[in-house]
C-alpha cells in the first residue's frame, strides 16, 4: 500500500472513542494527514474524526514557555514528589495502558486518584457497591431484548448509534424483526429527541425518580401503593401498573439510565432503587440494568482504578493502602476545600466545568496537564504536554459502556507522544527521585 502524502488509505474496523458506545465498525479513509471519510460514524463520530488535524503546538511547556520533553518531565516529577497532598485526575479519554501508569504514579507519591466518574456516574459506582448490578453486554441486548427502558437519558443526542446499533433498531437472534419485536419506554422530565423513537413516554416530575422507582418495586412485589403517588411523581397508578406488568412479562428487559437519575436529588439512592428493581424483576423474568456512560473510556478508567485499588474513583493512597470516600477524596471537593497542593490532570478539563472555588484553587497550585487539544486547563498548567489522540493516533485498549474491552486501530501517526509514553517517563523519574529505581512496568 502506498504511503505517499496524497495516497488514499482505508482503515477498516477502526474504533470511535468519542462516547461510551465505542463503535468498532468504522471504515476510515485517510488522505495525507487527514481523515476524509468516516463511514458508519454518527454525527458525533464524524465530527470526532473529520475535524481531527495535526496540532501546531509545542511538545511541552513550562509556565507557557516551550521546552523539551525531558525538561517538562523533570519539572513534572519534581512537582509531584515535593507535593504533600497531590491528586491525579481525569483518565476518561485515554487508553487503559495509560490509566494503569497514572494509578502507579498516584501510588508512588501517595496521591488521591480520581476519574471524571466522580462528577457524572459516581453515585452509580457507589450504588453498585451497595446493591450489585444485574448486568449484560450490549450484544445480548441486541439479540435478546424485547423491552428497552431509557430512564433519565437522551441517547438520540448523547449516543446517536446506541439505538440503531445496540438497543432498539437492530435485528437480533431472538428479536428477528428488530424494532417491531421491541417495546421502547422513555422516562424523563421532558420530551427529548428520544421521545419520538419510544412507544411509551412517561413524564415524571423533576427530582421524583426515587419515589417512582420504589412505587414500581412495590407494585412488582404485589404490594399496595397509595393513589396519591400520581400527585407525588406525576405518573398515574395506571401508568405505573402498566409499566410494572410490561417489565414482569417481557422475555428479556433492560433499563438504561443516565445522569438524569444519578445526578439529581437522591443520587446514589436513586440508582440503588433502580438496581434493586432490576434485581427484583429477575424473580419473574430476565431483566438487566446498565448506565449510559459518556466519555470514550470512562468505563475503562473505572475498571483500571478498581483493579489497582479495589475502588472505582475517589481513592486516597496517602497511607500506603487505598481508602475510598466520595466527597472527601474526590477532586472537585478536594480543590473546592483548598486541600490539594499539586495535581496531575490527564485528558480532562476541570477549569471548564468545576465549581468556581475548585477552579480558583487549581489555578493557585502547581499542576501538570496532558491533553491533545489546547484547553483552559492546559493554558494555566505549570507543565503542559501535547499528546496524541487515542483511537486516531494511538493504539491501546478501551472499555465499552458494557465493560467489554476493545482494541484500538489507529489511523494516523502523530508527532506527539502518547499519554502512556509521557506518564511512563514521569513515573520512571518519580521512582528515581524517591529512591526506587527498579522497573515496575515493562
Image (tube, grey):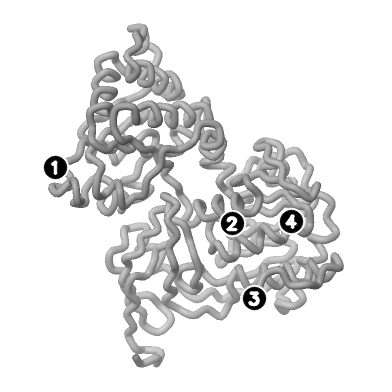
* Secondary structure state at the residue bearing disc 3: loop
Residue named by callout 3: 59
**Left or right: 264 in relation to 438:** left
**Left or right: 180 in relation to 245:** left
Splitting the image into 4 quarters, where does residue 249 fall?
top left
Residue named by callout 4: 107
Nearer the observer, disc 1 or disc 2? 1
Q: Residue at x 49, y 72 (%)?
A: 395
Nearer the observer, disc 3 or disc 1? 1
Residue named by callout 1: 180
Mark sitting earlier along the chain (3/1): 3
Nearer the observer, disc 4 or disc 2? 4
Residue named by callout 2: 91
Q: Residue at x 20, y 34 (%)?
A: 199
Answer above or below: position of 222 versus 105: above
* Secondary structure state at the residue bearing disc 4: helix
Position of residue 415 measured from the top left corner of the image (x, y, whole percent)? 56, 80
Disc 3 versus disc 1: distance between alpha carbons? 53 Å
Name the foreground residue: 311 vs 349.
311
Position of residue 219 measured from the top left corner of the image (x, y, whole percent)? 33, 16
Residue 12 visible at all: yes
Mark sitting earlier along the chain (4/2): 2
* Secondary structure state at the residue bearing disc 1: helix
Instruction: Report if the CB atoms under discs 4 and 2 are less than 8 Å apart.
Output: no
Disc 3 versus disc 4: distance between alpha carbons? 27 Å
Mark sitting earlier along the chain (1/2): 2
Mark sitting earlier along the chain (3/4): 3
Amino acid at each position: 500500500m502506498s504511503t505517499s502524502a496524497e495516497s488514499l488509505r482505508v482503515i477498516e474496523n477502526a474504533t470511535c472513542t468519542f462516547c461510551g458506545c465505542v463503535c468498532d465498525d468504522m471504515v476510515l479513509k485517510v488522505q495525507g494527514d487527514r481523515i476524509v471519510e468516516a463511514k458508519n460514524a454518527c454525527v458525533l463520530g464524524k465530527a470526532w474524526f473529520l475535524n481531527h488535524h495535526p496540532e501546531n503546538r509545542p511538545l511541552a511547556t513550562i509556565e507557557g514557555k516551550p521546552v523539551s520533553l525531558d525538561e517538562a518531565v523533570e519539572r513534572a516529577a519534581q512537582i509531584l514528589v515535593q507535593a504533600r497532598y497531590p491528586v491525579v485526575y481525569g483518565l476518561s479519554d485515554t487508553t487503559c495502558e495509560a490509566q494503569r501508569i497514572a494509578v502507579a504514579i498516584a501510588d508512588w507519591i501517595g496521591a488521591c486518584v480520581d476519574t471524571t466518574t466522580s462528577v457524572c456516574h459516581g453515585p452509580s459506582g457507589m450504588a453498585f457497591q451497595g446493591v450489585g448490578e444485574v448486568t449484560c453486554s450490549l450484544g445480548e441486548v441486541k439479540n435478546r431484548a424485547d423491552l428497552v427502558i431509557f430512564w433519565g437519558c437522551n441517547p438520540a443526542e448523547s449516543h446517536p448509534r446506541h439505538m440503531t446499533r445496540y438497543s432498539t433498531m437492530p435485528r437480533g437472534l431472538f428479536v428477528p424483526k428488530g424494532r417491531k419485536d421491541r417495546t421502547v419506554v422513555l422516562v424523563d422530565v421532558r420530551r427529548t429527541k428520544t421521545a419520538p423513537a419510544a412507544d411509551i413516554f412517561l413524564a415524571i416530575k423533576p427530582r421524583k425518580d426515587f419515589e417512582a422507582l420504589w412505587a414500581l418495586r412495590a407494585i412488582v412485589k404485589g404490594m399496595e401503593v397509595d393513589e396519591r403517588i400520581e400527585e407525588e411523581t406525576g405518573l398515574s397508578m395506571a401508568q405505573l401498573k402498566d409499566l410494572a406488568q410490561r417489565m414482569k412479562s417481557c422475555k428479556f428487559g433492560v433499563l438504561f439510565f443516565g445522569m438524569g437519575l444519578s445526578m439529581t436529588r437522591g443520587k446514589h439512592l436513586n440508582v440503588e432503587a433502580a438496581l434493586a428493581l432490576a434485581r427484583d424483576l429477575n424473580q419473574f423474568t430476565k431483566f438487566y440494568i446498565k448506565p449510559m456512560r459518556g466519555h470514550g473510556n470512562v468505563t475503562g478508567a473505572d475498571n483500571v482504578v478498581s483493579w489497582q485499588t479495589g475502588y472505582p474513583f475517589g481513592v486516597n493512597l496517602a497511607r500506603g493502602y487505598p481508602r475510598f470516600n466520595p466527597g472527601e477524596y474526590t477532586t472537585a471537593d478536594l480543590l473546592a476545600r483548598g486541600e490539594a497542593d499539586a495535581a496531575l490532570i490527564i485528558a480532562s478539563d476541570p477549569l471548564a466545568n468545576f465549581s468556581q472555588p475548585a477552579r480558583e484553587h487549581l489555578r493557585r497550585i502547581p499542576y501538570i496537564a496532558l491533553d491533545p487539544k489546547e484547553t483552559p486547563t492546559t493554558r494555566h498548567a505549570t507543565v503542559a504536554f501535547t499528546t496524541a489522540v487515542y483511537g486516531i493516533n494511538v493504539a491501546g485498549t478501551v472499555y465499552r459502556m458494557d465493560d467489554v474491552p476493545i482494541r484500538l486501530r489507529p489511523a494516523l501517526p502523530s508527532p506527539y507522544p502518547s499519554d502512556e509514553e509521557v506518564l511512563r517517563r514521569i513515573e520512571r523519574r518519580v521512582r528515581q527521585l524517591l529512591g526506587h529505581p527498579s522497573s515496575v512496568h515493562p
